[in-house]
Image (tube, rainbow, N blue to C red):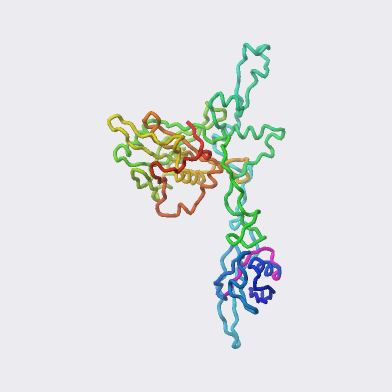
C-alpha cells in the first residue's frame, strides 16, 4: 500500500513490489479520476527524485516500501506551482501548496491566436498575379495532323495544361512551377474546393492525455509521422537573375583580395517567369553582407544589430529578402584565373551544414498560401552558391530545400549561440555525397 499526497488530498493505491511504474501511474490516474496524465510523481516532499513512468522500472527500484508516502505534482501549461512550505499549526506540520487559478487539466492555445483561414491570407503580389492568369500553353495549328479549318481545334492543337509532363520534358524542366502544381490540384471535378496543403511537422503533438507527457512517454497519436525524402514534383522558384552583374563582382571582391569565403543576403523581388508555365523568377537588386567571421574553409554569421534597419530600408524601396548567397572558391591557377571544381554529382552539391542553414532560413521566410490551413506553405527563399564549374571558372548555382527536408532542418536550438555557423566542412569529406533528393536546382 502506497499513500499518494496531492493538492486534492491523500489517497491510497495497492501495488506489488515488482509492479512497474507505468502501472503505478495508471492506478493513480484511476484513483484521482483525472482526465489525462497531467501529473508527475515524486518520492520526496520537495518534489525531488521523480518517479519515471516505465515498463522496465519497478516500485522497488525507487526503494518504496509498504506504507510509504509519494507526492503528486499537477502539471499545466501555465506557471509552475511554488514549492511546498512547512507551516506549524497547533503543534502539527502541514504542507501548503500555492497553485495557479487556471484549471490543472486544461489544454489549449496559450496565446489565443486564431488559425488564419483561406479568406484572410495575404499572398504575395506575384502569387495573386499568377492566380489570375490562364496558364495554358497555346499551340499553333499543325499543318500535317490538323485536318480542320483555322477557326477549329483538335487534340493536336488544343492548349496544354501548365503541368503537362510531355511539354515540361520538351522544355527540359525537371520540376513544374508551384502554381502549375496548384492548377493540377484544382483540375478535378471539385475544382480544388477540397484541396488542402498540409505543412510537415516533426514535433511531438501536445495535449495527448493517454499517457504521461513527453519525454516520459509517447504514443502513435502524438508522435510525428515518418518522413520519406522523395523528389518533389514542384518548386516555388524557377529562376533567379541579378539586375546588374556588378552585384556579383563586388561580392566576389572580398574573396579575390583576402582568399576567404563570404556570405550575404539577397534583396529583391519576385516576378513572373515567362519561360516556364506559371513560373516565378527572383530578381536580385542588392546584396547585404552582415557581420561575419570567415576563413578559407568556413564562415560564421555574427549577431547583427542593423538587420531591422536594413529590412525597413528594403521595405521602403519595395524589396524583400529572397535568399542568401555564399562563396566556396579555391584558387587553382592564379595566372590563368581558374578555380577548383569539387561540387558535382560525384561528391556533393551542398553539405549537411549548408542544408540545415538553408532550411532554417526558409522556415524564417514562409510562403503565404490560401490553400493551407496554416496560412503558409513552403518558402520562396533561395540558396545561391558561388563555386567553380567544370570549366574551372567561377559560376553561380541556385538551390532550394524541399518541404520534407526543411521540416527536418528546423532545429532552433542550433541557432541560440552567439555565433551561428553558416557552413563548416572538411575538403574531401563524405558529407552530402548521398543522392540529393532534398535539393532542387534551378537556373
Residue 183 image offset from top left, x and y in percent: 63, 32
The quarter holding residue 284 reads top left
Residue 233 image offset from top left, x and y in percent: 58, 35
The quarter holding residue 17 reads bottom right
Please state which of residues 23 and 267 is positioned toward the viewer in this rendering: 23
Residue 22 is one of the magenta-drawn residues: no
Regarding residue 320, the answer to whether it shows in the image is no
Q: Which residue reaches farthest bottom?
A: 91
The residue under the point 55% across, 35% down is 235
Residue 262 image offset from top left, x and y in percent: 36, 41
Residue 36 is one of the magenta-drawn residues: yes
The residue under the point 61% across, 40% down is 370
The residue under the point 35% across, 45% down is 294
Specify start and end residues of the magenta stretch as a single range. Answer: 31-43
Would residue 424 be found to the left or right of residue 214 on screen?
A: left
Residue 347 image offset from top left, x and y in percent: 44, 37
The residue under the point 55% across, 73% down is 83
Please state which of residues 369 and 91 is positioned toward the viewer in this rendering: 91
The quadrant of the image that shows the N terminus is bottom right
Please state which of residues 356 and 247 is positioned toward the viewer in this rendering: 356
Q: Which residue reaches farthest front?
A: 18
How many discs appear? Answer: 0
Q: Please determine whether, in this image, residue 151 is positioned above or below residue 345.
A: above
Regarding residue 414, the answer to whether it shows in the image is yes
The quarter holding residue 397 reads top left
Amino acid at each position: 500500500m502506497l499513500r499518494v499526497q496531492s493538492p486534492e488530498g491523500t489517497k491510497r493505491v495497492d501495488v506489488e513490489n515488482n509492479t512497474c511504474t507505468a502501472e503505478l501511474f495508471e492506478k493513480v490516474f484511476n484513483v484521482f479520476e483525472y482526465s489525462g496524465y497531467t501529473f508527475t510523481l515524486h518520492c520526496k516532499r520537495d518534489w525531488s527524485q521523480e518517479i519515471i513512468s516505465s515498463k522496465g522500472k519497478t516500485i522497488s527500484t525507487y526503494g518504496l516500501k509498504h506504507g510509504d508516502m509519494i507526492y503528486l505534482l499537477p502539471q499545466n501549461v501555465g506557471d509552475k506551482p511554488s514549492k511546498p512550505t512547512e507551516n506549524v499549526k497547533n503543534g502539527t506540520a502541514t504542507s501548503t501548496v500555492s497553485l495557479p487559478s487556471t484549471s490543472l487539466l486544461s489544454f489549449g492555445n496559450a496565446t489565443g491566436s486564431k488559425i488564419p483561414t483561406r479568406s484572410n491570407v495575404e499572398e504575395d503580389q506575384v502569387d495573386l498575379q499568377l492566380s489570375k492568369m490562364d496558364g495554358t500553353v497555346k499551340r499553333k495549328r499543325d499543318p500535317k495532323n490538323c485536318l480542320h479549318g483555322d477557326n477549329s481545334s483538335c487534340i493536336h492543337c488544343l492548349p496544354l495544361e501548365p503541368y503537362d509532363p510531355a511539354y515540361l520534358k520538351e522544355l527540359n524542366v525537371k520540376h513544374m512551377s508551384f502554381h502549375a502544381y496548384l492548377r493540377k490540384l484544382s483540375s478535378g471535378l471539385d475544382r480544388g474546393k477540397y484541396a488542402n496543403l498540409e505543412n510537415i511537422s516533426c514535433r511531438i503533438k501536445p495535449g495527448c492525455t493517454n499517457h504521461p507527457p513527453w519525454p516520459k512517454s509517447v504514443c502513435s497519436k502524438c508522435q510525428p509521422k515518418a518522413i520519406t525524402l522523395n523528389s518533389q514534383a514542384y518548386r516555388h522558384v524557377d529562376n533567379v537573375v541579378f539586375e546588374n552583374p556588378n552585384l556579383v563582382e563586388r561580392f566576389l571582391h572580398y574573396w579575390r583580395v583576402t582568399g576567404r569565403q563570404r556570405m550575404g543576403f539577397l534583396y529583391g523581388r519576385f516576378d513572373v517567369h515567362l519561360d516556364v508555365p506559371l513560373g516565378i523568377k527572383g530578381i536580385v537588386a542588392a546584396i547585404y553582407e552582415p557581420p561575419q567571421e570567415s576563413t578559407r574553409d568556413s564562415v560564421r554569421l555574427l549577431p547583427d544589430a542593423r538587420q531591422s534597419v536594413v529590412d525597413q530600408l528594403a521595405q521602403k524601396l519595395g524589396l524583400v529578402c529572397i535568399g542568401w548567397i555564399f562563396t566556396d572558391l579555391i584558387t587553382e591557377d592564379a595566372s590563368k584565373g581558374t578555380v577548383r571544381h569539387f561540387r558535382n554529382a560525384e561528391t556533393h552539391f551542398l553539405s549537411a551544414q549548408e542544408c540545415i542553414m538553408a532550411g532554417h532560413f526558409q522556415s524564417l521566410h514562409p510562403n503565404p498560401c490560401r490553400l493551407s490551413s496554416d496560412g503558409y506553405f513552403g518558402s520562396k527563399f533561395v540558396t545561391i552558391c558561388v563555386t567553380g564549374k567544370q570549366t574551372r571558372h567561377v559560376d553561380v548555382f541556385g538551390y532550394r530545400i524541399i518541404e520534407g527536408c526543411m521540416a527536418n532542418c528546423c532545429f532552433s536550438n542550433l541557432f541560440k549561440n552567439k555565433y551561428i555557423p553558416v557552413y563548416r566542412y572538411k575538403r574531401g569529406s563524405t558529407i552530402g555525397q548521398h543522392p540529393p533528393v532534398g535539393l532542387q536546382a534551378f537556373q
